[in-house]
Image (tube, rainbow, N blue to C red):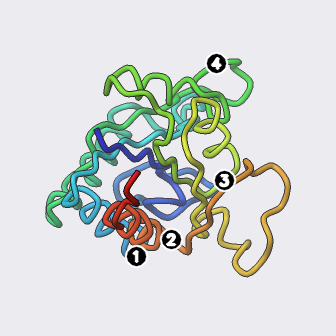
Amino acid sequence: MKLVILDRDGTINHESDEFVKSPEEWIPLPGALEAIARLNHAGWHVAVATNQSGLGRGLFDVASLNAIHAKMHKALAALGGRVDAVFYCPHGPDEGCQCRKPNPGLFEQIGERFGVDLKTVPVVGDTPRDLVAGVAVGCQPHLVLTGRAASLKGQPLPGGYPAHTRVHQDLGAFADWLLARASAPRPAS
């Protein structure tokens, strides 16, 4: 199975320091939904792993989170795309759970749900914690220079990023890279 794991806020949609609390506040980044649809059309499954501590902080409820994801799913469907599953951590940073990134719990759940070994599965996000969580289970780290990483454009990566992190301008550029790599002829062994 060809699987990609994406962060949500700052990778698929605009990040907010005030949290994305309602469907109205969920605004896709330019080209992000089209990138997911292109991946789907090439046979890739897409899962989302997202910290949603606004739930634990009481800033929004599960119904609101479901409505946000319904908006995302509907917008993707209009482009012929889909996210197969959304995995989220509702806990705050001080709750000591294993699912809040940079802990790998969400990724372990994704591996179990899809029945796949996550080694070599790309993980795409806009913060070190997105990538650290994926690398802990063997994923390949990909940073997009959107959301919280937008300030890193044209600069070397600071500490905290996993070794071998590939950098892309945005989710569209990542999709271009992955699709070009997937269609490249393999050398004969």
Residue matched to label 3: 127
Residue matched to label 4: 97
> Around disc 4, counting alpha carbons within 10 Å, would you say few (fewer than 14), some (14 to 19), or many (20 or more)?
some
Gap in angstroms between the C-alphas marked 3 and 1: 19 Å
Residue 120: image location, x then y, percent:
49, 42
- For image coordinates 57% across by 34% down, the residue present is 138
- Which mark's residue is nearer the viewer, 4 or 3? 3
Gap in angstroms between the C-alphas marked 1 and 2: 9 Å
> Around disc 1, counting alpha carbons within 10 Å, would you say few (fewer than 14), some (14 to 19), or many (20 or more)?
some
Q: Residue 120 vs residue 33: left or right?
A: right
Q: Residue type at mark 1?
A: Pro
Mark 4 or mark 1: whose residue is earlier in sequence: 1
Residue matched to label 1: 30
Of residues 165 and 63, the one nearer the viewer is 165
Q: Residue type at mark 4?
A: Cys
- For image coordinates 43% across by 60% down, the residue present is 12
Residue matched to label 2: 170
Q: Are marks 4 and 3 in contact (CB under 8 Å)?
A: no
Gap in angstroms between the C-alphas marked 4 and 1: 33 Å
Mark 4 or mark 3: whose residue is earlier in sequence: 4
- What is the quadrant of residue 113 in the picture? top left
Q: Which mark is residue 104?
A: none
Gap in angstroms between the C-alphas marked 4 and 3: 19 Å
Of residues 18 and 160, the one nearer the viewer is 160
Mark 3 or mark 1: whose residue is earlier in sequence: 1
Please, what secondary structure does the residue beneath circle 2 have?
Answer: loop
